Amino acid sequence: MRVRSPGVVGTVGEFSGDFLGPLKRLSFDPFTLDAETRQLLHGPDDQPVHLSPKAYDLLCVLVETRPRAIAKSELHERLWPSTFVSDATLASLVAELREALGEKGHTARFIRTVHGFGYAFSGLAREHAAPEVKRVANWIVYNGRETSLDEGEHLLGRDAESAVPLSSSTVSRHHARITVNGQIAILEDLGSKNGTYLRGQVVTAPMRLADGDQIRIGAFELTFRSLEAPGSTATQL
């Protein structure tokens, strides 16, 4: 949490990058800090709370260093590197942040003033790990486009609702089907008028696909790519 990610310098002397490093979301009821969208969200419906970019960065710094109190001089360096900014500007930013967090008067549920020193984040926060990115294991390449093939059945044909739509009079409405089941992908012709060809041979029965296989459907040449299937072998089921 305390690893600072490399920032992006915006206007001269200003830091406009993310402070949260690998952390993507952090909750402190009823708020959520979302580093992906650079937003402060409120409530179960994740309603955006307005914050200026610099106030957002201040919140990130305080959350990042919690529960340690951070000196005003360090905040100046983090928020306005190599630029002179008065303490009044920092105090104004703290006031904006407190207002956004619903703190009024001497109530300091989230932002604690350490008199003569600086500020600290005092809320109880819960970190959310970044969601695991789903790996695309199989896909079709045609006409410079790529279409992913998840687990299950995928229609190829002239129908616009097909997983792989192929708009041509040479293609039947429901021309062929690719079924992905774990590491196995199967190609079938669905009784098309002009046939389906795999590796230059007409498909008359379900055939297992391999990475790099060439499929011809009407006027279209498609390539099946896979991180799971082995290299091309002529396998008929």
Image: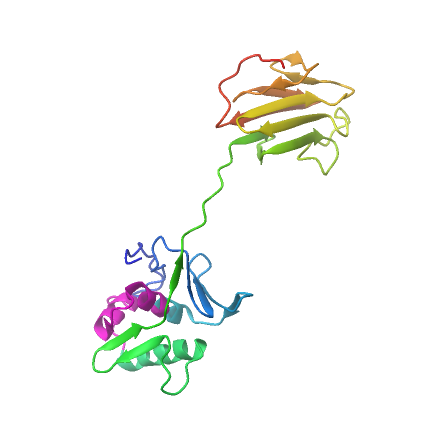
Most extreme residue toward the bottom is 105
Coordinates of residue 91 in the picture (x, y in percent): 32, 80
Coordinates of residue 163 in the picture (x, y in percent): 66, 35
At horizontal 23% and vertical 69% (from top left) the residue drawn is 74
Q: Quadrant of residue 119?
A: bottom left
Q: Is residue 73 left or right of residue 162?
A: left
Q: Nearer the viewer, residue 211 or 80?
A: 211
Above or below, 230 against 71 in this view is above
At horizontal 32% and vertical 73% (from top left) the residue drawn is 122
Which residues make up the magenta segment? 58-85
Q: Is residue 217 visible?
A: no
**Residue 88: within the magenta?**
no
Q: Quadrant of residue 210?
A: top right
Q: Is residue 25 left or right of residue 79?
A: right
Q: Is residue 234 left or right of residue 175?
A: left
Coordinates of residue 111 in the picture (x, y in percent): 34, 76
Q: Nearer the viewer, residue 181 or 93?
A: 181
Quadrant, the N terminus? bottom left
Above or below, 62 against 144 in this view is below
Quadrant, the C terminus? top right
At horizontal 51% and vertical 36% (from top left) the residue drawn is 136
Above or below, 122 against 136 in this view is below
Coordinates of residue 164 in the picture (x, y in percent): 66, 33
At horizontal 51% and vertical 32% (from top left) the residue drawn is 137
